[in-house]
Image: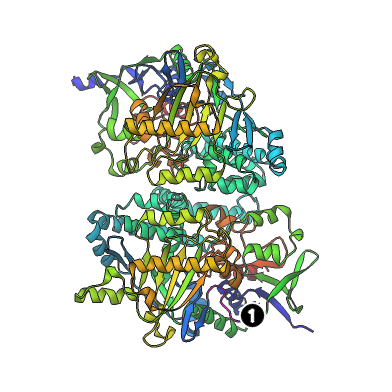
Amino acid sequence: MNPAVQVRRAAYDAIVIGAGVNSLAAAATLAKAGRTVLVLERRAAVGGAGSALEIEPGFHADAAYDDIGWIPSSLVRDLDLTRHVRIVSSAMPVVAADGNDASLTFTASGPDLDGLRRLSPRDASRWPEFAGRVAAIAGFLRTLYAAPVPDTALDQAGDLRTALRLALKYRGLGRRDMVEVLRVLPMSVAEWLDDWFEHPLLKGALAARGVTHSAFGPRAAGTAFVFLHHQVAARPGAMRSGLRVEGGIGAFAAGLARAAQAAGAEVRTGAEVRRITAARGAVDGVELASGERIAAARVVSGASPRHTFLELCDPARLEPGFVHAVSRIRYRGAFARVHFSLDGLPPLGGDRASGALVAPDMDYLERAADDAKYGRASERPFVRAFVPTVADPSRAPEGKHVLSAHVQYAPYRLREGRWDDAGREALGDRVMDTLERYLPGLKALVRRREVLTPVDLEREFGLPEGHAYHGELALDQAMFMRPVPACSHYRSPVRGLYVCGPGAHPGGGTAGVAGANAARTVLADGAP
Amino acid sequence: MTPRYDAIVIGGGHNGLINAAYLARAGRKVLVLERRELVGGAAVSEQVFPGFTFSVFSYVVSLLRPEIIRELNLPAHGLHVLPLESTVTPMLNGDYLAGWADHDLSRQELYRHSPQDADAYDEYGRLMHHMAYAVRPILSMLPPDPTSLSPRDLMGMLKFGKHMRSLGDEKFHALHKLMTMSSADFLDEWFEFDTLKATKSASGIIGTFLGPRSPGTAYVLLHHYMGELDGVFRAWGFAKGGTGGVSESIASSARAFGAEIRCNAPVARVITKGGRAVGVALENGDEFHANVIVSGLDPRRSFLQLLDPKELPADFADAIRRYKFRGSSGKVNLALSELPRFTCLEGNAPARAMLRQAAWRGAFSISPSLDYVERAFDDAKYGQFSRQPYMDIIIPSMIDPGMAPPGKHVMSIFVQYAPYNQQGGWTDANREAFGDAVVNTLSQFAPNLKSAILHRQVITPADIERITGLTEGNIFQGELALHQLFFFRPAPAWARYTTPIRGYWQCGSGTHPGGGIMGASGRLAALEILEHG
């Protein structure tokens, strides 16, 4: 008997690379279906970019994100997640200020309408209709995101079914919203908002959602799509804020890992995959950095498409056209995180406010993005500050607080200077100065700060070029184009190898959707 | 008793004239009413300074549909297109990049700058060729209404879907990328040489309020790739006598088919009766009646000015109100005492002299780098004309000597960006400052320019609007953005040249497929009128 055949006998039905949120959702889904699953995580803890970070002993921040975006209730149900995590829809207000007198409070469902009426009665009267349009389009996206995108060739039964479901959903929108879906998605968020509103503060705050995790400014076409992506599953009449988890983002990943383990999956941390092994054009397992080889019939990678195909696989063995397509994926990470430990509650300016937004108008955002175009960090950055300790005082010692800032734009590629200690400190200073301008008195409260540049985010969490979604979310890199057309169904050209990270449809900002969709594709493909 | 017509066409621009010609050709009694003293709209030639004739606004011909040239027999009516053979881009380091109508010559020149790009150039050319062929049928397709369940629309959607599927996966994905990417990102996938990318992407920004790094510009790149001249793809040309020559030939053809064209006849409003268009009233009060009224004007003028918007369904009126114009280009026309000497082409070697001669007969593109063009756009975003603008320049007198007195020349400079909403408004001072920015920037590349200028005409978007009537000075009667194309142009459900007012039709560039001296809108509208009017 050929010894190689023995090695190929798989120890696991599937190996999942990485223990980020999507990988864990994939592992849990597979394990629930009775597959033997092994999760391999390079870091010492699960969570990937969805991990906590200790600024100093006793001060716990969320490293890269403040919320988990959207998780479909069906996924919560399927994975029995309520037993392991407590998801809270964030009701904590965030205050947007223009640095002068005007401010506008945003709750989970949108702007405070009384406050908006004081700024602009016209905008306040238009808000309900706008929110209705948003919900209609976002509801359509929800259907689109719930399954692999139908292939344009429609040559598989599943594709046809999904396509029909989409067509019905589309018809169900009614004439006006059918038009709106097609019209709005390719627009710039700035143009779209200009059609509706007049007050700069409202437009700035809304446009900020259209450029979040993008290198583009609000005048770039397709940012309306990004805005709506971040509103997927919004309910009629209300905007949707990112969902939060009790205990922070790290608690969510830990809960997902427990759910996966409860279903029978094995999770190994401190286990870095060095390469994906293949024989006769099909994967047969992985090799760890330690040299250990583990056999599996399927490998599901939560790593970025670049890392998966160009580093873990041998690109020389892949079809050149595919390699070319993968190497052309745009990442262009442009955000950074700055965490502060504080001696007291910062002056957020609203009752029970837990965050502040520095995006006073659309030109402000556009100018911030202009800097990034030429390879500079924004001189006046867009900052979204979140103070998790308002809702959860246990994340800092008594009376103390934590403030985490999402900062744009900090382009991964700098034309001058580097993201070294000096670059990191300069960014930290700039963010602190910016926040001080909008939250006077903050500076005096700061104890320590921790800066994560795009390069840090890449090194620490494997975010390619620091992009949170493992690939820029733009119309040409969405849906059947994501990550590349040849594996937009999660299946890669290498038999038995699948992608399940945010680099795949529907992308980041949705917790575990890509992972669960990928797992369903694996299951649909049956036994190897 | 005023004479009775079968159809009245408002506006004697090229689409209006083409529309009238097709209607007349089918035996209809047609009247064209033009506000100005000459036909052509934005495609006019005028003797702006004694002895110097300019294509005042639009200046090159390439998109004019070959079936129109054929069916209206335009060559017999004086259409004569002379080819533009080259584009030279002066670089900041004193070198230049030349592109030629001949693919192999361009490749050779490119090889000098980047062997890798020269290799990619072949494949890129092939792809764009395929893409242009893929899009071409869409240009002559009637946009279906995607929200309608009528058999006609469903058939239309089916036809559209079938066409898309017939492209095959690879081309469909490439088309999707072209429709959604920025020209800079799209070109980054192919090329490394900055000046090449800048020059190519510049064709993607013409007439838009977008920069090369704005998503959506890759499509316009293709739009301009579709120029067809005598069946040769991609060739650009210059009409003998200027672009007014194109309009004159169409007008002549229309007259030969029996159409009547009246100039100095500004239409004030469309007369409606019981929700139906029955005629038009001129500013002087004269009225003309017909069962078919066709507007070649842009959507805002057609619906919000010639009609009382109250007569329109509210959602339609809203759609027209939010239809984007945002004119972004200007024009500087110069009368010159001598040819401009571009530093990058100077030199005594015979090869240089030949190149110089050839270049003068072609176009010059002031687009030395992507950053240069993008920065030009940055100015405009915040309401300021570009201090260092992108320019597309031709010297028509080198191709048609009749445009200038012997030994003298005319130079046509298309300039971006000049935002319609210039800070402080388009005052005379701002217009002159804009003209100075153009001349000063160009002088950096051709130092003798300033002293060679005999006369200068500066045209801002506000001037374009005032003279031609194009709203906000948008040369395409509305931006060519994805959400304003095909079944959205100019408004959903009204993209097939009909309007909510029975008997009232539209045929300008503000309808599918729009933009450029293409004429497809005028022709398709006429065919629809003949079939359903």
The picture places residue B330, in percent across and down from the top left corner, at 50, 66
Q: Residue A206 appears in which quarter of the rendering?
A: top right
Q: Which residue is label 1 attached to?
A: B27
In front here: B395 or B455? B455
Q: Is residue A30 left or right of residue B278?
A: left
Identify the image quadrant of residue B155.
bottom right
Answer yes or no: is residue B525 visible: yes
Quarter where residue A134 is shown:
top right
x and y percentages locating residue B495 in the rendered image: 61, 59
> Picture coordinates of residue A198 (x, y %)?
65, 46
Which percent across, then down, holds residue B239?
A: 44, 78
Please tell me how many numbered marks the rendered image carries: 1
Relative to A115, say whether A32 is above or below: above
Q: Which color scheme is applied?
A: rainbow
Q: Which residues are magenta?
A: B30-43
Image vertical order of residue A246 relative to residue B46, above or below: above
Image quarter where the N terminus of chain B lies is bottom right
- Give me the residue at 61% from left, 68% from top: B507
**What kind of element bears circle 1?**
loop
Nearest the viewer among A358 and B522 is A358
- Residue furthest to the bottom in view is B406
- In the rendered image, residue B33 lying in the magenta stretch gets the answer yes
Answer whether residue B40 is magenta in the image. yes
**Measuring 58% from the left and 60% from the top, which residue is drawn there?**
B424
> Is residue B28 visible in the rendered structure shown here?
no
Classify residue A37 as left or right of residue A120.
left
- Specify the amino acid type for callout 1: Gly
Q: Main secondary structure of the magenta part?
A: loop
Q: Does residue B118 appear to the left or right of A269 in the view shown?
A: left
Horizontal side of residue B249 vs A202, given as left or right: left
Chain ID, mark 1: B
